[in-house]
Image (cartoon, rainbow, N blue to C red):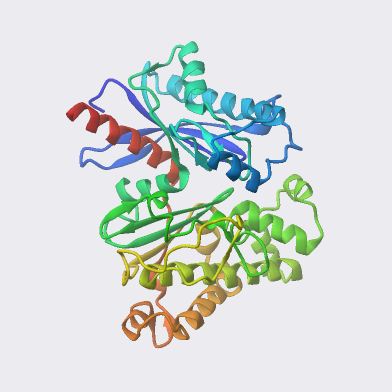
């Protein structure tokens, strides 16, 4: 790397945070190095395993009124998140034998007005001064920032950035693509007309997954995220999530149980396949013809999306599954119990659609069956961390050119 600093991309989730050193290739693309650090929040004494996030409706109301009032439990839980993040950056810097760093951070949740904190978090504490606290901690440890942390980015958007600019990314060779990542939560990203689209910029017609409520009155995150699938299985099997964690039963293990014929596991995957197909169908039809109202909203006050937008008529060249979702869909041994039912449900929706025209149906289906070549399982490791680092670098270079 020609520069006298290293790029560090940080991916902060609901249960852990990881920092990766990122390398810029000679061809202008980016790749993860082997240098990284990871911390689980529960390892920190400040972490409260019984912490319950503030009601989402209250969080949204406080953000809209610009009157966010953190409670003591949030402040305490936030310390674990901040300490863990700072520790990973410091350790990754030390492992890289670097003194100067450029940092990009991706986190779930809605950000504060200055984009440097978290104002709404569905699965964790709100942290209003996230960037400032991280800068302070790493500077005390002797890490020199070549540029302040300008913002906390969207982990979902950064998945798209990673897929666009990484050497083994899936966005780069197509004009229109949708990415759905299922990690602790759900992350979706969009590329239209050869441009990465921030979902915050199209919220008047495109709805994020965490905003949507499924037909069974559950958040749609429940059917695509690792935590959601685990909790769904726990409900059906009558097992508490804490016990599932202790036993190491996650989506992959649930799939294994389904293969062995366990009823609760089979029912879990049936629901995942059915509602995931409905979600993808919603994405396809919303792009083609605007919002059709297939889902309700977790926030009843959410403004109804527009039924018209400038990308209408758009057809996806790729539908990409990432993170834990790709891990279970790429396994051929799970094809019969998961992938095949997903394709069948999606094919039925597409063929019976009153929204799509015949040309659009032909684009997505062949002889009545969804074209499986349109779906790709991403092997891009740590896409949000990679995207965070890339974003920081691109903004840094743009600033230098100004």
Q: Residue furthest front?
A: 65
Horizontally, residue 143 falls left or right of residue 55, namely: left
**In the picture, residue 215 is in which quadrant?**
bottom right
Identity of the residue furthest to the bottom in this view: 367
Residue 65's place in the image compared with 214, above or below, is: above
Residue 160 position within the rendered picture, expressed as x and y whole percent measured from the top left: 38, 50
Q: What residue appears at the point 50 percent right and 32 percent down from the top-left corner? A: 117
Viewport quadrant of the C terminus = top left
Residue farthest to the left? 401
Q: Nearer the viewer, residue 309 or 251?
A: 309
- State whether residue 95 is above or below residue 322: above
**What is the residue that sits farthest to the right in this orientation?**
238
Residue 335 vs residue 194, the one in the foreground? 194
**How far from the left and from the top, in percent, is residue 211?**
55, 56
Direction from residue 326 to residue 290 in the image, left or right: left
x, y (%) of residue 293? Answer: 52, 70
State left or right for residue 24 relative to residue 210.
left
Residue 357 % position (x, y): 35, 83
Which residue sits at x=63%, y=35%? Answer: 125
| Above or below, comparing residue 306 to residue 241 in the picture | below
Front-most of 188 and 300?
300
- Give 172 or 284, whichever is nearer the viewer: 284
- Quarter holding the N terminus is top left
Q: How many marks?
A: 0
| Rendering quarter of residue 339 | bottom right
Residue in the picture at 61% in, 53% down:
226
Residue drawn at x 77%, y 46% is: 242
| Quarter occupied by residue 26 | top left
């Amino acid at each position: 790397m020609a520069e006298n600093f290293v790029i560090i991309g940080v991916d902060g989730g609901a249960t852990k945070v990881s920092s990766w050193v990122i390398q810029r290739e000679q061809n202008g693309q980016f790749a993860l190095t082997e240098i990284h650090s990871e911390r689980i929040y529960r390892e920190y004494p400040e972490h409260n395993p019984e912490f319950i996030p503030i009601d989402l409706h209250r969080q949204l109301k406080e953000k809209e009124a610009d009157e966010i009032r953190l409670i003591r439990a949030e402040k305490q839980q936030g310390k674990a998140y901040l300490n863990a993040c700072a520790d990973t950056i410091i350790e990754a810097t030390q492992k890289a034998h670097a003194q100067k760093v450029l940092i990009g951070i991706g986190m779930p949740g809605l950000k504060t007005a200055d984009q440097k904190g978290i104002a709404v978090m569905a699965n964790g504490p709100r942290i209003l001064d996230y960037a400032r606290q991280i800068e302070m901690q790493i500077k005390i440890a002797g890490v020199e920032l070549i540029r302040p942390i300008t913002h906390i980015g969207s982990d979902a958007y950064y998945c798209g950035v990673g897929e666009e600019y990484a050497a083994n990314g899936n966005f780069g060779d197509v004009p229109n693509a949708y990415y759905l990542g299922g990690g602790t939560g759900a992350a979706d990203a969009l590329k239209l007309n050869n441009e990465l689209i921030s979902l915050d910029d199209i919220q008047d017609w495109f709805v994020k997954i965490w905003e949507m409520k499924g037909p069974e009155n559950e958040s749609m995150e429940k059917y695509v995220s690792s935590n959601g699938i685990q909790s769904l299985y726990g409900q059906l099997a009558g097992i508490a999530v804490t016990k599932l964690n202790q036993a190491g039963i996650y989506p992959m293990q649930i799939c294994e149980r389904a293969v062995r014929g366990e009823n609760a596991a089979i029912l879990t995957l049936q629901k995942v396949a059915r509602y995931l197909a409905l979600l993808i169908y919603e994405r396809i039809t919303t792009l083609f013809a605007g919002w059709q109202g297939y889902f309700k909203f977790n926030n009843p006050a959410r403004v109804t999306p527009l039924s018209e937008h400038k990308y209408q008529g758009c057809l996806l060249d790729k539908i990409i599954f990432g993170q834990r979702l790709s891990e279970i869909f790429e396994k051929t041994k799970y094809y019969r119990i998961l992938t095949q039912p997903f394709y069948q449900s999606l094919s039925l929706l597409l063929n019976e659609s009153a929204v799509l025209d015949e040309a659009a149906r032909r684009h997505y289906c062949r002889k009545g069956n969804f074209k499986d070549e349109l779906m790709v399982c991403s092997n891009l490791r740590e896409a949000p961390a990679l995207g965070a680092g890339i974003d920081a670098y691109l903004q840094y270079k743009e600033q230098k050119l100004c």
